[in-house]
Image (tube, rainbow, N blue to C red):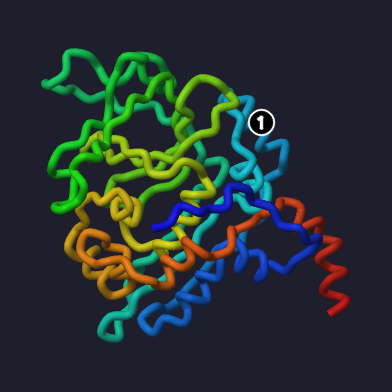
């Protein structure tokens, strides 16, 4: 897929309806899903934004400065949840899920103590808050973590030095035991965090996106399909998940289907940036005035 992604989130309107807000935020993905014959019951949670004081308190408590796109996101909407069902043989199954956790759920990763026979040192420190030591190496991939036929020369290896990690989402379905984190690569407060995936079953970490905005758009492009994060990383998918992809988004499986000009690829390469401004909902009074004018 292309790499052109809007890096800032900002609307230039005073007041918009909630419907317009969510349509712009999701780049019209809701309508795309609703127009699909096999997709049913598309639903989006409507949430209010967080107070600026709450965001500032979070930064002070954790000693990290949230990047502007994350601040604007939480100031406009306290988390995001879009779900949809897939109809198979006249029966609906909950398949699609796009989710960003609420600000209150953005908690620091404390680490999991785990004995490893192949290592002489512990992967985690004894501190209450999790930080990796400077000389520790994590996330070395194995052959079973790579899809057959994918580029083996790209090693999923990283060195997380003094990294602060905050859980921002969980992969769907929950049984996958995989979570998404904001990862501050150093102790410098001004350093913008990246997005990383952690598979608890194997205790491995994978870099997923260079920014929150990029991750959010990746989520939209993949329509919230099960384990789409693993699909991006070309990690093995369960058979039933691959079958869902073949039904809804076969072009999203690069190892099996040659990428063509599809809705998702066009959205990623040529679609408008999803722009967000926390000031678009000025106040309840403005909303009431807008309704009266109608």
Q: Is residue 61 left or right of residue 289?
A: left
Residue 120: percent from left, percent from top? 17, 13
Residue 255: percent from left, percent from top? 22, 59
Question: Few, some or many C-alpha atoms within 10 Å of disc 1 (few <14, some 14-19, many ≥20)?
Answer: few
Judging depth in this view, the residue of 261 and 63 nearest the camera is 261
Residue 285: percent from left, percent from top? 86, 61
Q: Is residue 59 above or below residue 105?
A: above
Please report the residue visible at 32 percent of the width from the left and 64 percent of the height from the top.
Answer: 252
Q: Is residue 281 left or right of residue 276?
A: right
Which quarter shows the C terminus? bottom right
Q: Is residue 51 above or below residue 221?
A: above
Q: Is residue 50 left or right of residue 39?
A: right
Please report the residue visible at 28 percent of the width from the left and 80 percent of the height from the top.
Answer: 88
What secondary structure is found at the residue carrying circle 1?
A: helix
Residue 171: percent from left, percent from top? 36, 51
Would you identify the image quadrant in which residue 37 lies?
bottom left
Number of marks in the image? Answer: 1
Please report the residue visible at 67 percent of the width from the left and 37 percent of the height from the top.
Answer: 54
Would you identify the image quadrant in which residue 248 lies?
bottom left
Q: Is residue 121 above or below residue 223?
A: above
Please report the residue visible at 84 percent of the width from the left and 71 percent of the height from the top.
Answer: 290
Which quarter shows the N terminus? bottom left
**Residue identified by numbered label 1:** 57
Q: Is residue 278 above or below residue 270?
A: above
Judging depth in this view, the residue of 236 and 53 nearest the camera is 236
Judging depth in this view, the residue of 55 and 194 nearest the camera is 194
Q: Is residue 1 left or right of residue 141?
A: right
């Amino acid at each position: 897929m292309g790499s052109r992604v809007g890096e800032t989130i900002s609307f230039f309107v005073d007041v918009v309806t909630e419907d317009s807000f969510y349509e712009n935020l999701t780049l019209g993905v809701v309508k795309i899903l609703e127009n699909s014959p096999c997709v049913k019951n598309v639903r989006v949670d409507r949430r209010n934004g967080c107070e600026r004081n709450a965001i500032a308190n979070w930064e002070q408590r954790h000693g990290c400065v949230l990047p502007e796109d994350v601040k604007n996101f939480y100031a406009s909407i306290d988390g995001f949840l879009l779900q949809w069902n897939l109809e198979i043989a006249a029966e609906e199954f909950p398949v699609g899920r796009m989710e960003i956790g609420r600000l209150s759920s953005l908690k620091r990763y404390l680490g999991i103590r785990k004995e490893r026979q192949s290592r002489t040192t512990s992967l985690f420190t004894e501190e209450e808050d999790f930080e990796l030591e400077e000389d520790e190496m994590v996330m070395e991939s194995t052959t079973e973590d790579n899809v057959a036929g994918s580029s083996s020369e790209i090693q999923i290896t990283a060195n997380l030095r003094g990294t602060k990690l905050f859980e921002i989402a969980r992969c769907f379905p929950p049984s996958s035991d995989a979570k998404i984190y904001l990862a501050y690569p150093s102790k410098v407060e001004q350093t913008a965090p990246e997005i990383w995936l952690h598979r608890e079953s194997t205790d491995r970490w994978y870099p997923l996106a260079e920014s929150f905005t990029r991750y959010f758009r990746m989520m939209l492009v993949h329509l919230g399909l099960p384990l789409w994060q693993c699909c991006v990383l070309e990690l093995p998918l369960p058979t039933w998940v691959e079958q869902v992809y073949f039904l809804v988004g076969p072009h999203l499986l690069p190892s099996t289907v040659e990428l063509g000009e599809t809705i998702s690829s066009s959205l990623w390469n040529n679609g408008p940036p999803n722009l967000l401004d926390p000031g678009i909902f000025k106040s309840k009074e403005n909303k009431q005035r807008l309704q009266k004018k109608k």
